[in-house]
């Protein structure tokens, strides 16, 4: 990394319902809550969740949240919109992950094989895209 840049700390995601999102991220991809606070200057509840390797997602639930626009819910149309797109998570067993998602009713948005990589996009409870890749 460049001088004075150490490592990526977290990704931030705004959510409509914190409890629903906390449950979804834990049940489906194994992230556990590590911090929960209310930030009066923002008018938002903020929770940090972490995977077993320590990577964190910062979830925001604003007092007056706005729903994600429909075009942001589809991988190909979202990629055309300038801005941050999604996070990608590596898996070592795409079929088992897919089976768990189907069992849990997770919204699978897109699946494709690109060369030797299996790729699957899912939507969290608010429609935020998350990509899973098996190399």
Image (cartoon, rainbow, N blue to C red):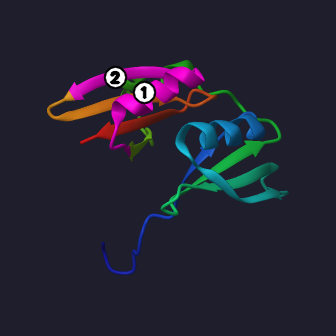
Q: Position of residue 77 (x, y in %)?
A: 39, 22
Rounded to the nearest angstrom, the CA distance separating label 1 from label 2 is 10 Å
Q: Position of residue 42 (x, y in %)?
A: 78, 53
Give me the residue at 74% from left, 43% from top. 61
- Sort mark 2 into few (<14), some (14-19) or many (20+) by Cα contacts within 10 Å: some
Judged from the image, the secondary structure of the residue bearing numbered disc 2 is strand
Q: Position of residue 106 (x, y in %)?
A: 55, 24
Question: Closer to the observer: label 1 or label 2?
Answer: 1
Q: Quadrant of the N terminus?
A: bottom left
The front one of 26 and 11 is: 26
* Residue of label 1: 98
Left/right of residue 113 with respect to residue 85 in the rendered view: left
Judged from the image, the secondary structure of the residue bearing numbered disc 1 is helix
* Residue of label 2: 111
Could one spot residue 103 in this view of the protein? yes
Q: Which residues are magenta?
A: 90-113
Q: Quadrant of the C terminus?
A: top left
Is 96 covered by the magenta stretch? yes
Q: Residue furthest left?
A: 115
- Sort mark 1 into few (<14), some (14-19) or many (20+) by Cα contacts within 10 Å: some
Give me the residue at 51% from left, 27% from top. 101
């Amino acid at each position: 990394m460049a001088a004075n840049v150490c490592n990526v700390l977290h990704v931030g995601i705004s959510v409509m319902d914190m409890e629903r999102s906390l449950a979804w991220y834990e049940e489906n991809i194994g992230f556990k809550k590590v911090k929960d606070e209310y930030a009066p200057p923002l008018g938002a509840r903020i929770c940090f969740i972490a995977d077993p390797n320590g990577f964190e997602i910062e979830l925001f639930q604003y007092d007056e949240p706005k729903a994600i626009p429909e075009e942001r819910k589809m991988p190909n149309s979202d990629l055309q919109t300038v801005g941050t797109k999604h996070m990608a998570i590596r898996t070592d067993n795409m079929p088992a992950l897919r089976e768990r998602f189907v069992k849990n009713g997770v919204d699978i948005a897109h699946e494709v094989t690109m060369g030797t990589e299996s790729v699957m996009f899912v939507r969290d409870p608010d429609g935020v895209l998350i990509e899973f890749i098996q190399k």
